[in-house]
Image: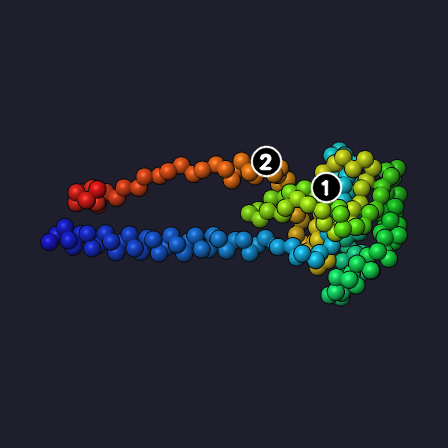
Amino acid sequence: MKKLVFFIFIILLVSICLVGWNKHNQAAGSGEEDYQVIPDEAIRLRILANSDEEADQKLKHMVRDRVNERVTEWVADITDIEEARKLIQQKIPEIEMIIQEVVDENGTENDFSVEYGSNISFPMKLYGDYLYPAGEYEAILITLGEGDGSNWWCVLFPPLCFLDFSFGTTVEAKDLQEEELEEPEEVEVKFFLFEWLGWS
């Protein structure tokens, strides 16, 4: 009789623990809401620095701030992707002027180029738990100098530039495949209660 009472008590205790564990996992899983899914119809901004030297990275950030500020103002009241495309195409010369101003203010002689199209290459990016796949996307591409430095990118339309996707980790497809191919180790779970009752 004592064994039966003890067994019922343990079952209740295990049930309570499982409910709590399940709620914890659901709360942890909801963290995915912190990562923004980029819409299919979006216009990105990608800036390639001349190099990873401090001065070149500083220039990249200055260009980023100035261009992002202006473009965000232009598209603030736009809800139609076609309207946003037309506006950005018209504003390319103005974007070039903005970059030139920053370059002149910074006292550098870096050449730069501005390209807008639907075939701008982006690497695969792991941002938190969310994977942004590599591919060709519609974007404004600003290349400073040789464009050999670390890049920065965000989504201009719809405006998601408050998320700095560059803090994510660039991963190669082969690395991801290796992770997916790794099989989890089998774990054998034994309950002391079952062993004690001689049920194992």
The amino acid on which the numbered mark 2 sits, given as a three-letter code, is Lys
Q: Percent x, y for residue 175? A: 57, 36
Which of the image's four quarters has the N terminus?
Answer: bottom left
Q: Nearer the viewer, mark 1 or mark 2?
A: 2
**Residue shown at 19%/52% (left/top)?**
7
Q: Can the viewer see residue 105 in this picture?
A: no
Q: CA distance from mark 1 to mark 2?
A: 21 Å
Name the residue tied to disc 1.
151
Q: Is residue 8 left or right of residue 48?
A: left
- Give the camera-side residue of 123 and 68: 123
Residue indicated by mark 2: 174
In the picture as drawn, the residue positioned furthest to the left comes out as 1
Is 165 displayed left or right of 142 in the figure?
left
Residue at 23% from the left image edge and 52% from the top image edge = 10
Q: SS for tag 1? A: strand
Report the colour scheme. rainbow
User: In this figure, what is the number of numbered marks?
Assistant: 2
Residue pictured at 85% horizontal, 43% vertical: 113
* Image location of residue 177, percent across then percent down: 55, 38
Seen at 59% across and 35% down, the residue is 174
Report which quarter residue 171 is drawn in: top right
- Judge left or right: residue 161 versus residue 21: right
Label 1 packing within 10 angstroms: few (<14), some (14-19), many (20+):
many
Residue 116 in the image: state x and y as whole percent.
81, 50
Q: Is residue 104 left or right of residue 66?
A: right
Q: Quadrant of the C terminus?
A: top left
**Mark with earlier residue (1, 2):** 1
Residue 153 x %, y %: 71, 47
Residue 79 in view here: yes
- Residue type (three-letter) at the residue carrying disc 1: Asn
User: Label 2 neighbourhood size at 10 Å, few (<14), some (14-19), many (20+)?
Assistant: few
